[in-house]
Amino acid sequence: MKHVIVFLGLIFLTACGSLKNTQSNNPPDGPDGLKGNLGRTIVDSTSVLEIMNFLASDDLKGRDSGSEGIEKAAEFIEGIFVQNGLKPYFRTFKDTLTNFEKPAYNIVGVVKGTDKQLQNEYIIIGAHYDHIGILTPENGDAIANGANDNASGTTTVLELARYFGNSKSNKRSLIFVLFSAEEKGLLGSNHLAKKLKEQDLNLYLMLNFEMTGVPMIDKDYMMYVTGYGKSNLAEETNKYANKNLVGFLPTAKEFGLFQRSDNYPFHNEFNIPSQTYCTFDFTNFNFYHKVGDELEQMDFEHMAQVINNMIPVLEGFSNSPEQEIKYY
């Protein structure tokens, strides 16, 4: 199905442009008591829609790793990083995969921490931006747009990058990563985890976002974390969110989701808390790896709420004086 593509420059200006004009010396709190730099909703459904409209468009042909479509997505992500003051973690934003036969890139940007000591500790905030490309046609549609999987997680990370790139409200340094070749077997995250381990990165925490496009059904929490019982991440997340934001989803444990997303290579390499936030609960979305994973299925208000709720959580993790998240 064809989507109306928002002109790229317009997206950069509206969804991802600098927020500095709205800042003040004594900024008021954001919604729900968020300590933000804006006297309005920090993220709204309009900006979420504008990013999703590009990432899940037919023009990107399902964002298969090594394809022209995912190259467009990579350039789009780089543009958002540049517009919001992120710096390349490496020489450029593109981190070329060494374990994939075609040219493929993780996109890696950093917001340096403001504390002279804590800035040497890093939190990775990631999501994969690739999908599975072209499939056997169904009702004349062959493009697996991957709106929920994982344009939604990518959008979450980009909006968080936009916020912290402008607010600079993090004492620890934040690395924002969009991974390629997750669908090929976690290749992008495997590549980067090994590379950063070899460079002896002082990794404090790895937080990954996967399939956050639709709300869960009949739950008293908004998200779950994979590997729920392996650490106190859920408890600490709820503390900073000041609500029951994260809960336990038994089917996530049953299907081994902890081992099936881009958090897992960082767990293996660094043995520090590395977990994925998700709102796909196996009952609320019927188009996993199908051509029906389209923009029209997404709940943009829900996505904005996820992002806004995560901002004080990330501020809490990045500014706490000591390590709070621990493996059991």
Image (tube, grey):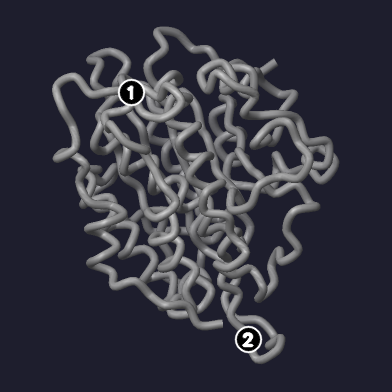
Q: Position of residue 289 (x, y in %)?
A: 69, 67
Write the residue at 82% across / 46% down. Answer: 255
Q: Is residue 9 above or below residue 177?
A: below
Which mark, residue 92?
Answer: none
| Residue 210 appears in the figure | yes
Quadrant housing the C terminus: top right
162 relative position to 210: left or right: left
**Of the pair 177 and 244, the residue shown nearer to us:** 244
Q: Can you say whether 158 is above or below 101 in the image?
A: above
In the rendered structure, which amino acid carries the disc numbered 2? Answer: Asp
Q: Residue at x 25, y 46 (%)?
A: 88
Q: Position of residue 175 (x, y in %)?
A: 37, 37
**Residue at point 51%, 48% (across, down):** 127
Q: Position of residue 130 (x, y in %)?
A: 52, 63
Where's the N terminus, which quadrant?
bottom right
Look at the picture and state if 84 lies above or below 323: below
* Residue farthest bottom in this picture: 140
Q: Between 261 and 46, which is closer to the camera in this rendering?
A: 46
> How many numbered tags mark residues here?
2
The residue under label 1 is which amino acid type? Asp
Residue 112 makes an appearance in the image: no
Could you say which quadrant of the image residue 8 lies in?
bottom left
Q: Residue 116's spot in the image, x, y percent? A: 23, 15
Quadrant of the rendered structure where residue 248 is?
Answer: top right
Q: Which residue is painted at 49% across and 59% down in the image? A: 129
Q: Which residue is label 2 attached to?
A: 141
Question: Of residues 264 and 40, which is closer to you in this image?
Answer: 40
Label number found at residue 29 = 1
Q: Secondary structure at mark 1?
A: loop
Q: Nearer the viewer, mark 1 or mark 2?
A: 1
Q: Nearer the viewer, residue 97 or 165?
A: 165
Look at the numbered discs 1 and 2 and tell me whether their residues touch, using CB distance below 8 Å.
no
